[in-house]
Amino acid sequence: MSQTLTQIAQELIDANKKIQLIYAFNGTGKTRLSREFKELIAPKNIDDPSSAEAEPSRNKILYYNAFTEDLFYWDNDLDADADPKLKIQPNTFTGWLITLLQELGEDGNITTNFQRYTSSKATPTFNQEYDRKTKDQNNNEIDVTIPAFSEVTFHVAKNDPSAPETPDEITEDNITVVQGQYEKIKVSKGEESNFIWSVIYSLLEQVISTLNEPDVTNRITDKFDNLEYVFIDDPVSSLDDTHLIELAVDLAKLIKISTYTEGNGLKFIITTHSPLFYNVLHNELNSDFKKFNPDGTSSWIYKRAQSEKYRLYKQGDGTYKINKSNDHPFSYHLFLLSEVCKAINTDQIKKYHFSFLRNILEKSATFLGHPRWEDLLDKTAEGNPNPFASRIMNLSSHSAHAGEETADIEESDKERMKELVIYLINTYRFKTQEALNV
């Protein structure tokens, strides 16, 4: 059944599951779904349109998505090119976040998580409060106070054995020496994304640790007492496979240990476009988790029935479908092949379906040990890969100029795709969920 994203968000809320895992292609609408979900959980004040929200959304939902990353931006120090800083955009959420980071002393955990999931040699350091000079609108020099934890610098060692072990040991007394032993750098875009995720992940660890304390009066803070949901949208875009698997395992364990009883407790929605991340989480969430008590007894704190898995699709008319997945992880290349078969059966072949087909060929060639994906294509009478098939795949997947791109597909190209898919299925005995109408 076709739905709007708002309807799907409401369906996720009504499911009342501890964890809901959703796979979707990039561009399907995962980030928009997280926004629609937030609006249902913490709606704006309809009686006062000028009011931002009836109550801060952070009281009920903690979420990570592309908008979270937008709250961090670089000051590249273009004049001196010596002091690049990652700044945190001030607003009500980041103000709340910065205060919590300071109160809970999370900077060390953020550094640990960042370096573990990236294997980076850079050490992130939050600033302390300081004053700096700037010019006002009348060009008069004024002092401005920069709040603590509003800027992050990244340091790397220069292989000097006399340098302090970490930039945390830098003090006013040794700053002159240390400046020669460490340098400030601007980390890569991937490291930046992972640092921002590490901030949220470290906060999430503290959230779960705090809420797992049943006596509210003993909790380290009351800031999380009304929290209901955590919505995580694709935290893995810049991780390699090894760190991606590590994060998926850690995240699944963190979710499992969070207190949840009969529909009550913190609930999680995770969306991703990564088949590997989805599959690792899928497997981890399919195993029950038991807690062993000091008196020797044990109790289940997570049962697989508390989780649900879905795949989100965007329809041609702009509506959406969300289907429950089965109890098994899915093979990405078979999923793509099923999508190609659907497009052929409904005569809805687009250019991106040729990209799907090439992806299938590349993964299959690697698995079978062929150096080139073209080796899997049907051959000419002389035994060479069919040049027409190769040309179609190259034009559709790797055109060199934007001017070559067209929305329409020639009928002959559609027929050729169908022939190629039939050849692949019959030759390599692929099993697909979508049979071709031949």
Image: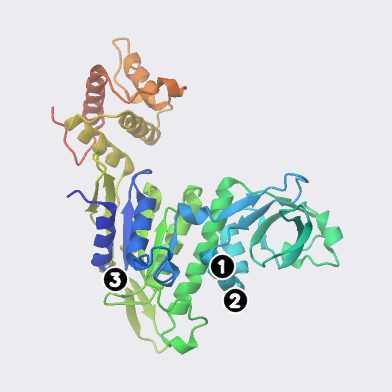
Local secondary structure at mark 3: loop
Q: Whole-percent x and y of residue 298?
A: 35, 82
Residue designated by label 3: 303
Q: Residues within 10 Å of mark 2 (few under 14, many from 20)?
A: few
Local secondary structure at mark 1: helix
Q: Whole-percent x and y of residue 189?
A: 57, 46
Left or right, residue 389 beside residue 158: left
Q: In the picture, residue 299 is in which quadrant?
A: bottom left
| Residue type, label 1 | Gly
Q: Is residue 384 above or below residue 173?
A: above
Earlier along the polypeptide chain: callout 3 or callout 1?
1
Closer-to-camera residue (112/233): 233
Residue designated by label 1: 95
Residue designated by label 2: 103
Left or right, residue 143 beside residue 203: right
| Residue type, label 3 | Lys
| Residue type, label 2 | Glu
Q: Quadrant of the C terminus?
A: top left
Q: From the viewer's perspective, is the residue at label 2 or at label 3 nearer?
A: 2
The structure residue drawn at horizontal position 39% and vertical position 70%, both measured from the top left corner, is 54
Asked whether residue 295 is in view, the answer is yes
The structure residue drawn at horizontal position 26% and vertical position 42%, both measured from the top left corner, is 318
| Label 3 to label 1: alpha-carbon separation | 37 Å
Q: Residues within 10 Å of mark 3 (few under 14, many from 20)?
A: some
The structure residue drawn at horizontal position 40% and vertical position 34%, both measured from the top left corner, is 366
Q: Whole-percent x and y of residue 399?
A: 43, 23
Q: In the picture, residue 124 is in which quadrant?
A: bottom right
